[in-house]
Amino acid sequence: MTQRPEQLQQELQKLRRERSREQAAERVSVKALSMYASEDLLDVLMSMRNELLSLGLESPSVGFFFVQEEQNIQIYMSFENPRKHGLTWTSELLQEVDSETVMFHWDAEADESWEEDLRGWRSGEMWSPVRTSDEDEEEMRQFHEKLDMDGVMPFVGSGGRVVNVPFTHGWIAIRHREIVEEQLAMAKGLTDALSLAYLRARDFLRLEDRNEQLEQALQELGAAQN
């Protein structure tokens, strides 16, 4: 059966979108493979956020959560620069990437407050917490307090519209105004590159810790000889 021109056009557009996702994943993977230290993970995460935005995902904040043996959770959050909304902060945790974006990192203990998220992650399926605007503001209160911000970001209190995309070592939390299935598939397609970056960062961290221990041992040996 001969396909009509509009059907051919739709298939062509679909193939172009798929190729765009593949190219984005390739670029993030290359960024991960070019890491030289554990702190380079921040650059990979920013690259991934930028790729998501360039592929059409409209999100004021994207969070990356890495689960460490279900005891600790490494959190990296990137979002719109508060200065764009007349807000400032004093915490050194928040790094200003550029005029458009900031990012911060902290480690949290995986206590009972994380049980819902860990349960969703273990299921391997995407999940969205259902929160009212008031609940979302309360949930994000500690976030503002930790960063010592002098106001509240505009995206807070929007009904808690967050979708979590799981992968082997954690999940991506995407705050959105409206998200479609294709955009979720797009985020899922980048998670292999994210896992690669996390594993490389963990290996670098172990190597850095080992080097630090060796340097300390050499200093102690030198002191003992003196």
Image: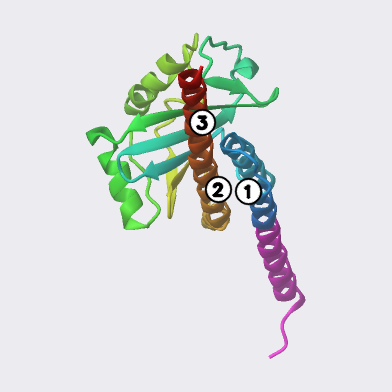
Q: Are marks 1 and 2 in contact (CB under 8 Å)?
A: yes
Place of residue 171 in the rendered image (x, y in percent of width and height, measured from the top left): 44, 46
Q: Which residue is painted at 43% across and 55% down in the image?
A: 168
- Mark 2 sits on what residue? 200
Residue 32 marker: 1
Residue 212 marker: 3
Give the extent of the magenta segment. 1-23
From the image, state whether disc 3 or disc 2 is nearer to you.
3
Tell me if mark 3 has few (under 14), some (14-19) or many (20+) residues whose alpha carbon lies within 10 angstroms of its own: few
The type of residue carrying mark 2 is Arg
201 or 112, nearer to the observer: 201
Q: Are marks 3 and 1 in contact (CB under 8 Å)?
A: no
Residue 100 higher or lower than 8, as above or below: above
Q: Which residue is painted at 71% across and 83% down in the image?
A: 3
Q: Which residue is painted at 40% across and 53% down in the image?
A: 126
The type of residue carrying mark 1 is Ala
Place of residue 44 in the rendered image (x, y in percent of width and height, measured from the top left): 62, 42
Residue 152 higher or lower than 192, as above or below: above
The type of residue carrying mark 3 is Glu
From the image, state whether disc 3 or disc 1 is nearer to you.
3
> Does 13 sit left or right of 107 as displayed?
right
